[in-house]
Every structure is written in C-alpha cells, then in structure tokens.
Amino acid sequence: MKDLSTGYALIGHAPADREFAAGLSRQLRARGIQPRSDEHGAPTDQLIRLTRRADALLVVMTAAADDYEPLSAQIAVARSSDIPIYPLAVGDNPPMLELSDLELYRVSRPSGLPESLLIALAHAVDAPDPSGRRKIGMPLAIGAAAVAVVLAVVITLLVVRRPATTADPEPTGTVPATTATTGSVTAGQVTITSPGDGGVVKRCEHVTGGASLPSTDTIMYGVNRVSPPDKAWYYGYIGSYDNGFVPTTWSGDVYFGSGSSQKYDLFVYVMTVPAAHKFWNAHKSSDNSFAFGDGPPPGVPPAAHVRVTQGSLDEC
C-alpha cells in the first residue's frame, strides 16, 4: 500500500547518473514540480521508503541503470503501490525490461524533458500544469490584486473560487442550484446521489446518481479544487457510458487530489456522444488517461453539482 503522499516526484537512477538526475531536478523545480533523488548513495531500504511516499517515479534509464538492483527494487515497490512510473530513456538506451509495457520518453539532456511528461508528472503530484493551463512556474510573489483579477475572470465562467484563509470561510461565488438528491428523476434530468453536498470523499470516489436521458447522450464529470483555489479542471467519462445509453441509475469512479482537507466542486455534464468525444480528444492527456483544461466545458451548463471535502487518500 502506498504511504501518505508528500507531493514529490522521485527520480530513480544509478549512482553514475547522479549528475544527470541533478539536472532533471533543476528543471522540475523550475516548472513547479518538487523532485527528490538519491544524492548521496542512500541504502536500498531508504530508497524504498522514499519510493513508497512518492506520488510518481521517474526512472532514468542508462547503461549504468540496467544492472542497478536498488533501482529495480524501487520499480517493484512503485508497481505494487500503484505509483505512476515514467521511464526516461537517455539517448539511444533501450528501455529496461521491467518497464517495456509503459510509455517511453526519450531525452538527450536533463533540460529536455518533453512537455507531455511534465504535464503528466504535474498531474501525478497534484502540482500546477507546466503547460500554462495551470499555475506551474508562476512567481511566488503574485499579489492579491492579480489573484483578484483571475478570480473575477473565472467566476464569469461559472468556476467557483475562494481565497485560502486561516478560517477557511465558505465561498462567496454562486454555484448551480442542482445538487445531490435522492428524489425521482424527470426526463432530461441528472442527479448525484452520492457523495452528498458537503460530503467527504476519498482520493478515488465511487460516485452514483440518477438520469433520464436519450440513448444518444452521455455524461462526463468535471472536478475543480476550490480550497486552496486552483485554476485547473479535470474531466472524464462517468462509468462506461462513453457511447451513450446512460442507465437510470449510473455510477463511476472519480479521482480527486492527493491532499486531505482540500475542497472540490464536482460537476456532471450532459453531452451528445459526438460532442463528448470531440471535447475529450481536444483535452485528453498524452496517455489518454485523463483530460484537463482551465474551465468548465464551454457552452455546456452543469446538470448536477456537489461540493465535497477530500478526507483520505484511499483508492477505489
């Protein structure tokens, strides 16, 4: 089982590649992703503990890494703990056998990480998106006035925002009136029955609801963190209804973040199957595992909404 998240990407490498790993760390920090690496030749048991607490494992694959047993142990721990692994082949080095089933990224220098890899790592550690759609690399000295401008813009897009304060007050923005309900569903309506508005969710939550939709429609979710506020939105299909035929009682898994006590808005959107496919293809990640953007789907009003608090980091 994965240990409590600490929000970093661990760089796994052989001792001979320590300088290369240091270069990777500099690039990740510059893009807002917190890295960790073996800078001083830590023993294997310490590397395993670091791996269990990581949100992602970036494996530097070189000739020196092929026979480095501690790295193989880190990979095994990451797989058993469901920690995302990102193989990074340096130059023409072939992928390690135990990683041959994963998407391979190639680089020739530490500062040349592909943008798709940076986005995937940012998503894994719940950091802002380095593509500019999120807040990676934004100066820490952004003032309250700039935050207020961003806040005003996103409220006009129906994105609920609030400043993070010690008292953590309730947001002052407006949200759609449709919330969780257990009542009957009328034609064209969608409801969320679990979690309830104000409920507590896990990192991966099994969401249920009701619907009365044409067979040509499908449902997608949109998730946005409102405390602390985050510009990024994540989307996905709910259940296995990407080709329509949403049942009257639907269910599916929704992923939230990697930190407890954070608050999220969960929206359900109804689209025609072709429109949903088009939206997904325009926003999907390079590995087709999730979709992301900087606001709600344009022109699509939310069909249902709840605001929830993340409790545990448990998976579904």
Image (cartoon, rainbow, N blue to C red):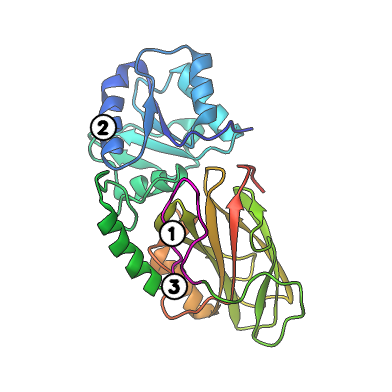
Label 1–label 3 contact, CB within 8 A: no
Q: Secondary structure at mark 2?
A: helix
Residue topped by disc 2 = 26
Q: Is residue 125 above or below residue 168?
A: above
Whole-percent x and y of residue 35?
Answer: 37, 32
- Marked residue nearer the N-terminal end (1 or 2): 2
Indicate whether residue 190 is drawn in magenta: no
Whole-percent x and y of residue 38?
Answer: 38, 20
- Marked residue nearer the N-terminal end (3 or 2): 2
Left or right: where 82 falls relative to 208: left
Left or right: where 40 falls relative to 193: left
Q: Secondary structure at mark 1?
A: loop
| Residue at the image point whose x is 71% and y is 72% from the top | 181
- Quadrant in which residue 205 is drawn: bottom right
Q: Nearer the viewer, mark 1 or mark 3?
A: 1
Residue topped by disc 1 = 162
Q: Nearer the viewer, mark 1 or mark 2?
A: 1
Residue topped by disc 3 = 158
Q: Nearer the viewer, mark 3 or mark 2?
A: 3
Amino acid type, callout 2: Arg
The boundaries of the magenta stretch are 158-174
Q: Main secondary structure of the magenta part?
A: loop
- Quadrant in which residue 284 is drawn: bottom left
Amino acid type, callout 3: Leu
Whole-percent x and y of residue 82?
Answer: 58, 38
Q: Secondary structure at mark 3?
A: loop
Indicate whether residue 162 is drawn in magenta: yes
> Can the viewer see residue 75 in this picture?
no
